[in-house]
Amino acid sequence: MNIIFLGPPGSGKGTQAKIVSERLGFPQISTGDMLRAAVREQTPMGLKAKSMMDAGQLVSDAVVIGIVRERLSRSDCQKGFILDGFPRTLPQAHALRSALSEMNRQIDAVISLEVDEESVVRRIAGRRTCRDCGKMYHVEYDPPAVVDLCDVCGGDLFLRDDDKEETVRRRLQVYSEQTAPLVDYYTKAGLVCTVDGMQDISEVSDQILKVLGGN
Ligand code: ADP
Ligand code: AMP
């Protein structure tokens, strides 16, 4: 099954994509995680992407489409995949459709997570990410056992540069201008399943698994 998670920053895409990935056995493909890895490794692409990410802007379509195309061609995506944070623009959605049609494949479902703006800002302000393994927490809603330390690897938890308030406002504006139109695009294609993302993490995953028919 080929699935897309759509929703504003902080709506829970990464959290839910990871849970669904573990339950259904399809890889989670997060363009944000891949770009952050490139920034950490200081690859030429990472160096170019960093300033856009820090400013809360989108990285160029060409770069992101390139990394997704490469990722989808790997063998672990044969049975299905979960896209988290891609596509984010109409040109990315068109490029995804062409890439999949070249492989005789298509998107089967688009999970659209609905969360109000105030909650999204609160979630992002409290999000903490492990510097070593990338696992995410929330200081209030999903805290680690020991403050500021990762439960899995013991790494330090930090606030992402682009999770600072002024950048978050910019990212929400970019979302409404460039990404929100995709909800319409995929609704017209008959693919959208709307999920109430305001519930607890486990309630949201139960609902997603139900609409995907995996429960
Ligand atoms: P996105 O990938 O859409 O940017 P995340 O999955 O990173 O969003 O979630 C943002 C923050 O909100 C994280 O700190 C996460 O722990 C927390 N979170 C995710 N889902 C929920 C939820 N249903 N209720 C409360 N907090 C949540
Ligand atoms: P995320 O982890 O999904 O919140 O993404 C963090 C940042 O990475 C975004 O604010 C963008 O700068 C960049 N990014 C992630 N995915 C994309 C995408 N599909 N298109 C363009 N930029 C992206």
Image (tube, rainbow, N blue to C red):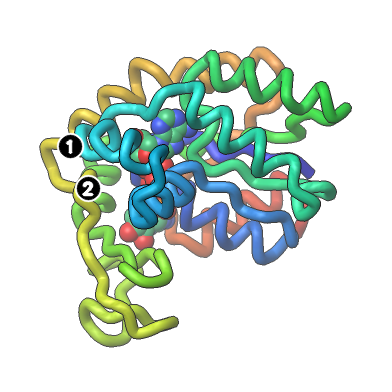
Vertical side of 61 occupied by 23: above or below: below
The kind of residue tagged 1 is Thr
Given contact means CB atoms under 8 Å apart, are the residues at marks 1 and 2 in contact? yes
**From where the camera sits, is residue 114 visible?**
no
Give the SS element for disc 2: helix
Give the SS element for disc 1: helix
Q: How many labels does the image show?
A: 2
The answer to whether residue 132 is left or right of residue 170 is right
The kind of residue tagged 2 is Asp
Image quadrant where residue 53 sits: top left
Vertical side of 180 occupied by 155: above or below: below
Q: Residue furthest front?
A: 44
In the rendered image, residue 116, in percent from the top left (x then y), is placed at 32, 37
**From where the camera sits, is residue 58 visible?**
yes
Q: Who's the residue at 30% across and 23% down the image?
A: 174
Give the residue number, with chain letter if any, for mark 2: 163
Q: Who's the residue at 53% across and 22% down the image?
A: 183
Give the residue number, with chain letter if any, for mark 1: 167
The answer to whether residue 55 is left or right of residue 194 is left
The answer to whether residue 158 is left or right of residue 215 is left
Label 2 neighbour load within 10 Å: few <14, some 14-19, many 20+: many
Q: Name the quarter showing ligand 2.
A: top left
